[in-house]
Image (tube, rainbow, N blue to C red):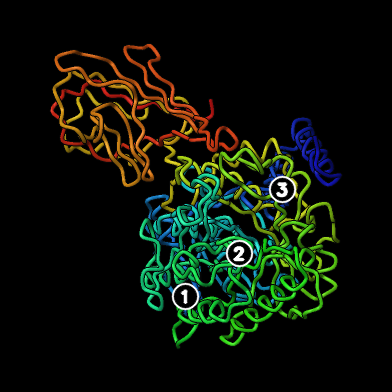
């Protein structure tokens, strides 16, 4: 099939020339004419059979793509060439570091002129692209230009994703122009009810950057529901996760972040184009503060509410915020700080007015330190007469009954679209989403959709969108791996919808299949993926005590199998461990086969029998962990219902395991014929 009339014409000329050469009686004329026509056909573009590269798959997808013929292969001595700008040098160095981490190939970074086979990053004015946009030209070299260094950095994430698709990191030739529809592309993580270790927060910064998600809200305090703690607020779990000197003893002891490491997290985020928004949630969700200082608790609305009429409340919150906002190098480094302000009582007018006063007071308080205030939408729920500052204030529009988005826009607020009925994950709770409906979101949602209200795309007062994980049910067995299993597909999907808006070119079925082949981020594998399909990914004739397998862990849809000749083991004897989990041959309490992760110990009703030889297999997915003895299912640890208050209330207790593989323990038993199977994508 011919691509144009010009191709058809060339083909006709070619056939005519061949025929003439075969029938002419003048040999010299034959040769001359054939050589001339062949040379012409070689030089002219658009020949028959030319293959133009289709839009390559990346997340989020490229805005505009014009394909060319052929492929770019990095040169044997490929370089990363940057201009004289120090930020470009930093970005070029980051790209080279990530490239080596992912593909085991070192690229030299130079401030010089690129040649064929090189990568070149440059700043170039282009009003249509905006600050985050960039152009990408792939020819005999790769050239990135952008009006701003952040656009150059996003282009490096595109290049790394493109380089994943083929061996030798070959790239399709063509030209792309790429830019986002929305400036805020975010994720909120509740670290108050469940402690999320700092190493995972750092991983999430890297994952977000890989998908051009640029806003990470960290919810630093919250409390569980009192009905699961004998309906007693003094016994109910509550936590504030940040080191605090102003109020010694306030910081949670079951997991917290030092000020130093929280600052380092923000610095990492800044280097990767991600903004950290720290959130201290007041005046509701504040049980951590009232357990520390009971006199500031509301006696009427519950101990998890601050008393808005008590001057000591303001003294306390002032002191808390001041610790992280003041100084030449404050703990809260970014341009925005979130002060909470959601779900307070509105039963009495005087309470509503005082809530509005409180909200306005702390908006202006953080502004004194040069920060932009962020709040949860609550001012329809708390409708009143007391003015609340709206200019330059960012509101999370989460539930239209609490804050009607059209009214909030009229009042002047900038909105982040985070509708609870679409974008809230509450793991294993039985309400909201356990896993987001990514197909519906991909096909239908953009940040212009806030609940059942739809605004014009790219409305100037809708900054963008965000999805959230709320760990409402404290103690429900959910692990950080379980949280990640829910977050990652949502992250990939919503990265597209916040960057590309309504304009997606890839059908959802194709997207959902292709997204699984893209890495989490350079050097990041929270899910513990090994390979992509059904396979034995590790085998050892014998597992020796203290040995290493070469893998950290294997994620869901796996089977780990081994033969054991039992020897009496001390309680607490480990088979295998990783930084996040331990699998026991003899658990520390009952001496049974079991595992621990995230502070939870789960044991099978089975103990290793000294002197017996047994084949044991453990298989696991995102719902259960199963034990097989000599090929037969012995026990299935699935989601367990736990009841409270005479059956009135319940939680789902989750007993999943991402299996640890990093290091063998100091066991006495003989472990042979060990095999690890991956059943991913089955």
Q: Is residue 335 left or right of residue 93?
A: right
For image coordinates 31% across by 43% down, the residue present is 578
Looking at the rendering, which quadrant does residue 338 occupy?
A: bottom right
Looking at the rendering, which quadrant does residue 592 occupy?
A: top left
**Element at badge 3?**
helix
Q: Are marks 3 and 2 in contact (CB under 8 Å)?
A: no
Q: Is residue 471 visible?
A: no
Front position in the image: 576 or 511: 576
Front position in the image: 81 or 565: 565
Point out residue 634 in the picture as x, y percentages from the top left corner: 38, 16
Say above or below: 373 vs 227.
below
Say above or below: 146 vs 549.
below
The image quadrant where one finds the N terminus is: top right
Q: Which numbered marker is on residue 112?
A: 1
For image coordinates 28% across by 39% down, the residue present is 577
Q: CA distance from mark 1 to mark 2?
A: 56 Å
Point out residue 8 in the picture as x, y percentages from the top left corner: 83, 40
**Nearest to viewer (mark 1 / mark 3):** 3
**Label 3 CA crowd tier, 10 Å (few <14, some 14–19, many 20+):** many
Q: Residue furthest front?
A: 299
Q: CA distance from mark 3 to mark 2?
A: 23 Å
Q: Which residue is mark 2?
A: 284
Q: Which residue is mark 3?
A: 422
Say above or below: 675 vs 88.
above
Q: CA distance from mark 1 to mark 3?
A: 49 Å
**Nearest to viewer (mark 3 / mark 2):** 2
**Element at badge 2?**
loop
Point out residue 542 in the picture as x, y percentages from the top left corner: 19, 25
Q: Is residue 18 visible?
A: yes
Which comes sooner in the sequence, label 3 or label 2?
2
């Amino acid at each position: 099939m011919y691509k144009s009339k010009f191709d058809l014409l060339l083909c006709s000329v070619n056939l005519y020339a061949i025929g003439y050469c075969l029938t002419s009686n003048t040999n010299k004329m034959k040769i001359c004419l054939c050589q001339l026509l062949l040379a012409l056909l070689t030089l002219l573009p658009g020949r028959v059979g030319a293959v133009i590269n289709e839009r390559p798959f990346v997340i989020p997808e490229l805005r505009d793509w014009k394909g060319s013929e052929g492929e770019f292969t990095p040169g044997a001595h490929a370089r990363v060439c940057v201009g004289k700008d120090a930020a470009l040098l930093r970005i070029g160095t980051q790209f080279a570091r990530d490239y080596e981490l992912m593909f085991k190939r070192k690229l030299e970074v130079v401030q010089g002129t690129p040649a064929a086979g090189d990568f070149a990053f440059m700043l170039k004015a282009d009003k249509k692209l905006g600050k985050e946009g960039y152009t990408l030209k792939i020819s005999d070299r790769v050239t990135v230009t952008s009006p701003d260094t952040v656009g150059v950095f996003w282009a490096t994430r595109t290049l790394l994703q493109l380089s994943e698709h083929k061996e030798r990191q070959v790239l399709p030739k063509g030209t792309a122009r790429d830019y986002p529809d929305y400036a805020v592309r975010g994720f909120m993580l509740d670290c108050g009810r469940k402690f999320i270790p700092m190493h995972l927060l750092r991983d999430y910064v890297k994952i977000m950057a890989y998908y051009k998600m640029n806003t990470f809200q960290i919810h630093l305090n919250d409390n569980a529901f009192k009905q699961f703690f004998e309906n007693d607020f003094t016994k109910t779990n509550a936590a504030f996760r940040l080191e605090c000197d102003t109020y010694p003893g306030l910081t949670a002891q079951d997991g917290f972040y030092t000020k130093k490491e929280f600052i380092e997290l923000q610095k990492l985020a800044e280097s990767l184009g991600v903004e950290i928004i720290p959130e201290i949630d007041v005046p509701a969700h504040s049980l951590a503060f009232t357990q520390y200082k009971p006199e500031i608790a509301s006696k009427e609305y519950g101990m998890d509410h601050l008393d808005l009429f008590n001057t000591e409340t303001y003294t306390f919150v002032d002191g808390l915020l001041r610790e992280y906002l003041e100084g030449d190098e404050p703990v809260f480094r970014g341009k925005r700080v979130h002060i909470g302000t959601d779900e307070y009582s509105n039963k009495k007018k005087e309470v509503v007015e005082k809530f509005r006063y409180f909200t306005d007071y702390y908006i202006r308080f953080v502004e004194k330190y040069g920060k932009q205030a962020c709040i949860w939408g609550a001012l329809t729920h708390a409708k009143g007469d007391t003015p609340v500052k709206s200019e330059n204030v960012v509101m999370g529009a989460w539930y239209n009954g609490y804050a009607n988005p059209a009214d909030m826009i009229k009042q002047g607020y900038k909105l982040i679209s985070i509708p609870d009925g679409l974008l809230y994950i509450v793991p294993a709770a039985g309400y909201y989403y356990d896993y987001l409906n990514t197909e519906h979101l991909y096909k239908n949602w953009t940040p212009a959709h806030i609940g059942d209200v739809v605004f014009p795309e790219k409305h100037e007062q809708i900054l963008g969108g965000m999805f959230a994980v709320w760990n409402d049910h404290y103690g429900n067995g959910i692990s950080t791996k379980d949280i990640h299993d829910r977050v990652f597909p949502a992250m990939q999907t919503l990265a597209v919808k916040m960057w590309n808006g309504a304009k997606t070119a890839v059908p959802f079925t194709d997207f959902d299949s292709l997204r699984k082949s893209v890495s989490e981020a350079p050097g990041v594998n929270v899910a513990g993926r090994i390979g992509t399909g059904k396979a034995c990914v590790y085998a050892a004739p014998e597992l020796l005590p203290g040995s290493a397998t070469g893998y950290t862990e294997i994620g869901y849809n796996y089977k780990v199998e081994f033969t054991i000749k039992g020897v009496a083991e001390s309680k607490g004897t480990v088979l295998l461990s990783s930084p996040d989990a331990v699998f026991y041959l003899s658990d520390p309490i009952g001496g049974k086969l079991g595992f621990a992760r995230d502070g939870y110990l789960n044991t099978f009703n089975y103990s290793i029998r000294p002197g017996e030889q047994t084949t044991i297999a453990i298989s696991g997915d995102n719902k259960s962990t199963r034990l097989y003895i000599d090929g037969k299912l012995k026990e299935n640890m699935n989601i367990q219902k736990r009841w409270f208050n005479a059956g009135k209330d319940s939680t789902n207790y989750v007993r999943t395991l991402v299996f640890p593989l990093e290091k063998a323990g100091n066991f006495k038993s003989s472990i042979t014929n060990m095999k690890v199977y991956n059943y991913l994508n089955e």
